[in-house]
Image (cartoon, grey):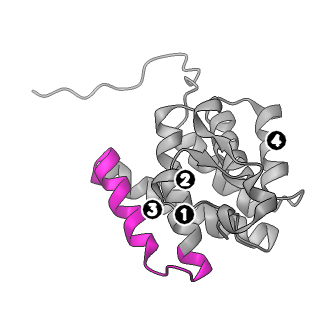
Amino acid sequence: MHAKNNPEQSATLTSAADLPIDDFEIGLLPLFRHFTLALSGKNPKAWQLAYGLAAERWGAPIGLSVAHEIGQLVAALENTRGSLPNVQDPLCINARLLVTLDEEYFLLMVHHMRRDETADAREAVWALTEGLTLAGFIRQALGFSARYSLVTPNVSRPGPALRIV
C-alpha cells in the first residue's frame, strides 16, 4: 500500500510541486491517503483524521462535505479497479509532498475535471482506473468536480437575488 514499501513504485515518486494543481487540490491529497488506508484495513480509523483535516482546512460545512465525497470516490475507485490505489503514508513528513503514480493520476483527474478539460481528464481517469471505467466511478468523480468546479457556468440572465428587507 505504501510507496516506500514497493521499490518499483518508489522510483516513480513525483514532487507534488511539479504538478499543475492548486491549493484546493493539494488539500485533497491527505484525505485521499487517509481514506485509502482506512479502506485497506491498515488504519481503520484513518477516516476520522480525514474528516478532521478537511474541517480544519475548509471549515466544517465545506470540509466535511469534501471529506465525505473523497471517501466515496476512493470506495468507487476500489470497486472500479478491484484494488485500492498505492498511496504514501499521510503521517510521514518526508512523504507529504511526494506522490505515487496513483496519487498523481488522482490529482490530475480532479484538476482537469474541475476545469472541464475533457481530454486530459479522460487520460488521468484511464491511468488511475487501470483502463477500467465503471459509470459509478465516473459519475462520482464528475459530481465532485462539478461541485468544486473552476469553470464559470454560462448563464444568460442573473438568477434571483436575496435581499434583507
Calculate the distance from the C-alpha at mark 3 to the C-alpha at mark 4.
30 Å
Q: Are marks 2 and 1 in contact (CB under 8 Å)?
A: yes
Residue at mark 2:
95
Total of numbered circles in the picture? 4
Nearer-the-camera pick, 155 or 127: 127
Label 3 secondary element: loop
Amino acid marked by disc 3: Leu
Disc number placed over residue 122 in the picture, else none: 4
Secondary structure, magenta segment, majority class: helix
Label 4 secondary element: helix
Counting from the top left corner in percent of width and height, residue 127 is at: 83, 50
Look at 33% across and 62% down and name the residue there. Answer: 52
Q: Foreground mark, 1 or 4?
A: 1
Calculate the distance from the C-alpha at mark 2 to the C-alpha at mark 3.
8 Å
Amino acid marked by disc 2: Ala
Amino acid marked by disc 1: Asp
Disc number placed over residue 89 in the picture, else none: 1
Q: Which residues are magenta?
A: 38-60
Q: Which residue is at the far left?
A: 165
Look at 51% across and 52% down and name the residue there. Answer: 94
- In which image quadrant can residue 84 be found? bottom right
Q: Residues within 10 Å of mark 1 (few under 14, many from 20)?
A: some
Nearer-the-camera pick, 14 or 85: 14
Nearer-the-camera pick, 95 or 26: 95
For marks 3 and 4 on the same chain, the one whose residue lies earlier in the sequence: 3
Counting from the top left corner in percent of width and height, residue 85 is at: 70, 64
Question: Is 6 situated above or below 39?
Answer: above
Residue at mark 3:
91
Label 2 secondary element: helix
Quarter the C terminus occupies: top left
Q: Are marks 1 and 3 in contact (CB under 8 Å)?
A: yes
